[in-house]
Image (tube, rainbow, N blue to C red):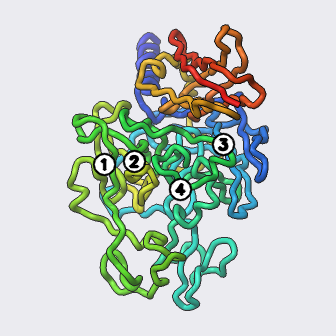
Amino acid sequence: MKLKTSLLAIILSGSCAMAQTNPAILSWLQNNTITGRHYVSGNSTPVVDAVIANCQTVQYSTNWVYVNTHGIPTYVTGPFLDGNPSLATDQNAIFKFPLNPVQNTGTITATTGGNIGVFINGVALFDYRDGVAWNATTNALCGGPGNPPCPGGMGAVNDWNRDAIPAERPGFDCSKAHPAMGNYHHHQNPSAFNLDLVTISNVCDLYPADGMYAIDSIVHSPLIGFAYDGFPIYGAYGYKNADGTGGITRIKSSYSLRNITTRTTSPTGAAVTSGPAISTTYPLGYFREDYQYNTTSAATPDYLDEHNGRFCVTPEYPNGIYCYFATVDANWHSAYPYVVGPTFYGVKTAAKVTSITETVTTYTPAATSIKSIANQELNLNVYPNPAAEFIAVQVSNLSKKNVNVELYDMLGKLIQTTTIYQGSTIAYFDTRAMYQGQYLVKVIADEKNITKKITIVK
């Protein structure tokens, strides 16, 4: 009996150690109180939904982690101004990820339509495609809403496959996402359009929202998700060198647009059925096959391989691991292949399951201190200043706990309170009914308060 007890203690100790050290268990944003919200076209006041946001439970065994989520973020979703009638709806999903992902040394696995990963807030990741292609027989687009079916049906191999990022931009909300039959998902870096260095969509002007994190060029981007092969996904910035040295830099895709004037060859140079002429309607970059992979770029430390990843040291993995990055260009616009793809580096073993059929331990996160948020390079941004109708308060990195924000007048009277929710970056104060003058915005982060002065004008 004593031997069995000791053995059980060792097993339990090992399980605890796993939970304390494996980011695939630790990193999910768990929440059971905050609900999702969405915008209706024509109304910038969000509708509060009944569905709980982010992830609800995280359970693990020796080899797997199971994440239960409704697939709804804490940031406001919608509206989708391209006529998409769908809303982000409850997915009630259990995702199963390997705790010890491995490289695929056999035939590489291509990414597919639909889920290819999950962000740490439980929202789905899709690859570049939107299910629309070019039909050379009819010289028109096929597949997707409003187009005739493609020859061969769903999943058929086409020579010219449309890229969702440029083609569907009018239908992305401020957070650069949209739903497919209710399954709300990102194809790209989950940072809001109005946080880019050069803004290419005005949807955030009409429907203020935010994204999972704000890109910050001076700190390592946060771990934002896991691909279906189990390897982690990071934001746009990381250590220049794979060993963690060289400072912080933008991690770059090794894909670039091809130097072509007609669409008659594949990226390998092989002859294919002709695609549409390059034009303002079908600009270069409109189709996935407009891009080529550059092996010379991939030989540079801060460029990525053909899967859009590299083996490197990160804050969560000090000994190094293969990582994907949500790539952007110099203006912080999403850069092909965007996150993962067009193939997986590892063995694709993750899945959406209906139930858990093995013995698991439930991971309960500790009361994570927000002190670390206050002590890191927070770069709290309060804007516009001066303000007239609203004040936006934004943190520079991913918030893993709710952050309380208060607005005071100069006499110390509390005027308004708001919250930056876990898994989002921004909160707002409505200042239309306030008097002109100076005010103080205070972010409360455990033992440290961060205060900014703001002026309201009329």
Q: Residue at the location (55% across, 84% down)?
A: 135
Identify residue for label 1. Answer: 310
Q: Inspect the image, locate mark 1, and give the three-letter code of the amino acid beneath it.
A: Arg
Q: Are marks 1 and 2 in contact (CB under 8 Å)?
A: yes
List x then y, in percent, for residue 208. 66, 42
Q: Is residue 430 above or below residue 368?
A: below
Badge nearest the viewer, 1 or 4: 4
Camera-side residue of 359 and 54:
54
Q: CA distance from mark 2 to mark 4?
A: 21 Å
Three-letter residue code for mark 2 = Phe
**Helix, strand or loop at mark 1:** strand
Whole-angstrom CA distance, mark 1 to mark 2, is: 9 Å
As helix, strand or loop, the secondary structure at mark 4 comes to loop
Q: Is residue 42 above or below residue 456?
A: below
Residue 208's tag is 3
| Among the 4 quarters of the image, the one containing residue 361 | top right
Where is residue 262 drawn, in percent x and y? 39, 84
Mark 2: give few (<14), some (14-19) or many (20+) Cα within 10 Å.
many
CB of mark 3 within 8 Å of CB of mark 4? Answer: no
Q: Is residue 101 left or right of residue 120?
A: left
Q: Residues within 10 Å of mark 3 (few under 14, many from 20)?
A: many
Q: Which residue is mark 2?
A: 325
What residue is drawn where x is 45% and y is 43%?
98
Tell how many labels.
4
Evaluate if marks 1 and 3 touch, with contact meaning CB atoms under 8 Å apart: no
The amino acid sitting under disc 3 is: Pro
- According to the image, label 4 marks what residue? 200
User: How far separated are the C-alphas under marks 3 and 4?
Assistant: 15 Å
- Left or right: residue 7 compared with residue 34: left
SS assignment at label 2: strand
Of pointers 1 and 3, the one earlier in the residue sequence: 3
Residue occupying the point 64% across, 43% down: 355
